[in-house]
């Protein structure tokens, strides 16, 4: 829906927003800490891809364990940059008015924060499981992983996009 200039409102982060941001930052640190702690113990061949059943179906050198932390770092900073932008620059599927701008902007920023948190959890889980598989203490991802990840991505979208007004 094309509309004119949207109201500009400064949205201060809530206590919950600050907690979500802190959790995302802690997970980002774990994303680098896990490979750092286990790198010397890892075998030369590490799982680098998983099929839909959660089984490793491609292997790379153990240095490939650093790909996920780097991608996670880039993702973290992109989400952080975007949610620090003025939300009046975003596109919205509903009409933004001076009366609903604050709630719509806050929902959008919270959706971004929750999505970043879910992605950080995903990356940490994948790195952790890759390490466990490499060390021989696991055979693959848990069977519930793909469904849990999809639910974790969809729940914030449904909640902030359709339920929370």
Image: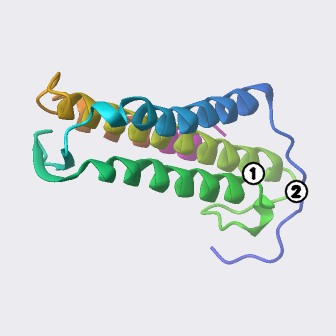
Q: Quadrant of residue 128?
A: top left
Taking the image as shown, residue 142 lies to the left or right of residue 156, namely: left
Predominant secondary structure, magenta span: helix
Residue behind mark 1: 105
Closer-to-camera residue (73/45): 45
Residue behind mark 2: 98
Closer-to-camera residue (125/136): 136
Q: Quadrant of residue 97?
A: bottom right
Tell me the SS state at disc 1.
Answer: helix
Closer-to-camera residue (94/127): 127
Task: Tell me which label, 2 or 1, sits earlier in the chain.
Answer: 2
Q: Which residue shows up at 50% across the image and 39% down it?
A: 32
In x, y percent, where is residue 37?
43, 29
Q: Which residue shows up at 43% across the image and 32% down it?
A: 34
Residue 114 in magenta? Answer: no
Tell me the SS state at disc 2.
Answer: loop
Q: Are marks 2 and 1 in contact (CB under 8 Å)?
A: no
Q: Is residue 2 above or below residue 79?
A: below
In x, y percent, where is residue 91?
65, 68
Residue 162 in magenta? Answer: yes
Residue range in magenta is: 156-165
Q: Report the Cα–Cα distance between label 2 and label 1.
A: 11 Å
In x, y percent, where is residue 43?
20, 39
């Amino acid at each position: 829906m094309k509309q004119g200039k949207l109201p500009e409102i400064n949205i201060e982060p809530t206590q919950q927003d600050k907690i979500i941001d802190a959790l995302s930052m802690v997970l980002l640190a774990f994303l680098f800490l896990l490979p750092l702690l286990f790198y010397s113990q890892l075998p030369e061949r590490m799982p680098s891809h998983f099929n839909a059943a959660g089984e490793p179906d491609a292997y790379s050198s153990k240095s490939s364990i650093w790909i996920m932390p780097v991608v996670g770092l880039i993702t973290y900073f992109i989400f952080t940059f975007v949610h620090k932008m003025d939300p009046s620059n975003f596109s919205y599927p509903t009409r933004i008015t001076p009366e609903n701008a604050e709630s719509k902007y806050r929902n959008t920023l919270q959706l971004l924060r929750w999505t970043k948190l879910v992605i950080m959890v995903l990356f940490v889980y994948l790195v952790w499981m890759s390490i466990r598989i490499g060390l021989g203490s696991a055979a693959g991802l848990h069977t519930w992983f793909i469904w849990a990840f999809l639910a974790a991505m969809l729940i914030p979208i449904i909640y902030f996009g359709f339920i929370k007004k």
